[in-house]
């Protein structure tokens, strides 16, 4: 999969060259998405079949997978990436489901192991965490945030940054 990642990175550099983190984010999603499509086409992965999970698929030296991957890579930047993806694997959009499919056995094991051992996921506020420092600083705890006035500013700032990031990512991925 390292070769696949390098190929994906070079194919999308023109679109995402401003932000290396976006480049790696997109390449990771595409890596799993393309791998799943190749495994489905070669019959090594059948969704819902526990005898053929995605994480056990091996496309090494598989001629059909090689043909599909070759068609995908030979197009380079001659066409919009979503069009090349659609023609090669039948999907035109980024989709993180393949990543979840690949790691589903691990996720299932973690769930069952946490149930078996009685592990508690997350945390709950019981009022004693950092109580001394909160009282000495003169802060008032309100809904999990300190100072209600700052809470509005923090949430608004977070939403603004989130929306700006999404818009920047989408505009960076926009077709030519």
Image (cartoon, rainbow, N blue to C red):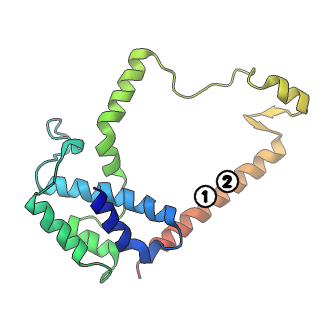
Image point (89%, 33%), residue name: 137
**Relative depth, front residue between 152 and 54:** 54
**Relative depth, front residue between 55 and 165:** 55
Residue 158 is labelled as 2
**Residue position for label 1:** 162
Quarter of the figure with residue 6? bottom left
Q: CA distance from mark 1 to mark 2?
A: 6 Å
Q: Is residue 114 above or below residue 91?
A: above
Regarding mark 1 in the picture, which secondary structure is present there? helix
In which quadrant is the N terminus drawn? bottom left
Image point (22%, 64%), residue name: 89
Image point (77%, 49%), residue name: 152
- Discs 1, 2 touching: Cβ within 8 Å: yes
Quarter of the figure with residue 106? top left
The x, y position of residue 20, in whole percent, is 50, 65
Residue 87 appears in the figure: no
């Amino acid at each position: 999969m390292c070769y696949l990642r390098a190929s994906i990175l070079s194919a999308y550099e023109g679109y995402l060259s401003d932000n290396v983190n976006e480049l790696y984010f997109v390449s990771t999603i595409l890596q799993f998405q393309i791998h799943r499509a190749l495994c489905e086409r070669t019959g090594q992965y059948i969704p819902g079949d526990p005898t053929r999970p995605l994480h056990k698929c091996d496309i090494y030296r598989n001629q059909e997978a090689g043909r599909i991957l070759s068609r995908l890579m030979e197009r380079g930047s001659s066409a919009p990436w979503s069009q090349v993806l659609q023609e090669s694997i039948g999907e035109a959009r980024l989709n993180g489901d393949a990543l979840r499919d690949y790691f589903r056995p691990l996720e299932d094991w973690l769930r069952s192991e946490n149930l078996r051992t009685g592990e508690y996921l997350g945390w709950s506020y019981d009022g004693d965490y950092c109580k001394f420092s909160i009282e000495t600083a003169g802060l008032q705890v309100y809904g999990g945030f300190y100072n209600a006035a700052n809470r509005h500013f923090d949430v608004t700032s977070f939403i603004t940054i989130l929306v700006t990031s999404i818009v920047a990512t989408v505009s960076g991925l926009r077709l030519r």
